[in-house]
Amino acid sequence: MISKEILVDYIQKAMPDAQVTVTDRTGMMDHFRVQIVSDAFRGKNLLDRQRFVYQALNEPMKDGRIHALEIKSYTPEEAAAAETPSSH
């Protein structure tokens, strides 16, 4: 088990500018969905972004505090574009 706040701390140590939203998917505090917006993702493909996040969370992943993790990663520009309604 790991609290949302501690999970955010791990991510923000690796990406100080990160805006992090954490959802506990099961209520057991070990299956999470994280949405991260950071300049650190600029120029990185999806796989490299996930590797970067997993590296930041290496300790709680290895010791079992995080059992499952779904990652949504965006640059600030990608996040802004996702929030803008389409003109269709």
Image: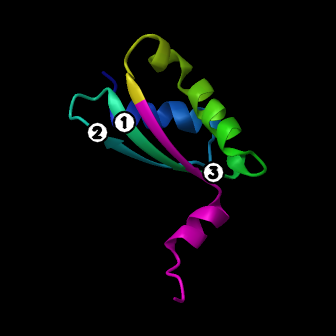
Give the residue type at disc 2. Arg
Q: Mark 1 or mark 3, which is nearer the start of the sequence?
A: 1
Q: Tell me the mark number nearer the camera, choosing from 3 and 1.
A: 1
Q: Is residue 36 above or below residue 14?
A: below
Q: Nearer the viewer, residue 80 or 70?
A: 70
Q: Name the residue located 51 percent from the left edge and 16 percent from the top edge.
A: 59
Q: Quadrant of the N terminus?
A: top left
Circles 2 and 1 in contact, beta carbons < 8 Å: yes
- For the residue labelled by badge 2, is the local secondary structure a helix, a strand or a loop? loop
Range shown magenta:
69-88
Q: Mark 2 or mark 3, which is nearer the start of the sequence?
A: 2
- Label placed on residue 25: 2
Give the residue type at disc 1. Phe
Q: Name the residue located 70 percent from the left edge and 37 percent from the top edge.
A: 48
Residue situated furthest right in the rendering: 43
Label 3, on which residue? 38
Q: Where in the figure is residue 11, as x and y percent of width and height?
A: 54, 35
- For the residue labelled by badge 3, is the local secondary structure a helix, a strand or a loop? loop
Q: Where in the figure is residue 73, as x and y percent of width and height?
A: 57, 48
Label 1 environment density (alpha carbons within 10 Å; few <14, some 14–19, many ≥20)? many
Label 1, on which residue? 32
Judge from the rendering whether residue 58 lies leftward or rightward of residue 60; answer left or right.
right
Give the residue type at disc 3. Ser
Label 2 environment density (alpha carbons within 10 Å; few <14, some 14–19, many ≥20)? some
Q: Mark 1 or mark 2, which is nearer the start of the sequence?
A: 2
Judge from the rendering whether residue 28 lies leftward or rightward of residue 80; answer left or right.
left
Q: Where in the figure is residue 52, as x and y percent of width and height?
A: 65, 33
Question: For residue 25, which quarter of the picture?
Answer: top left
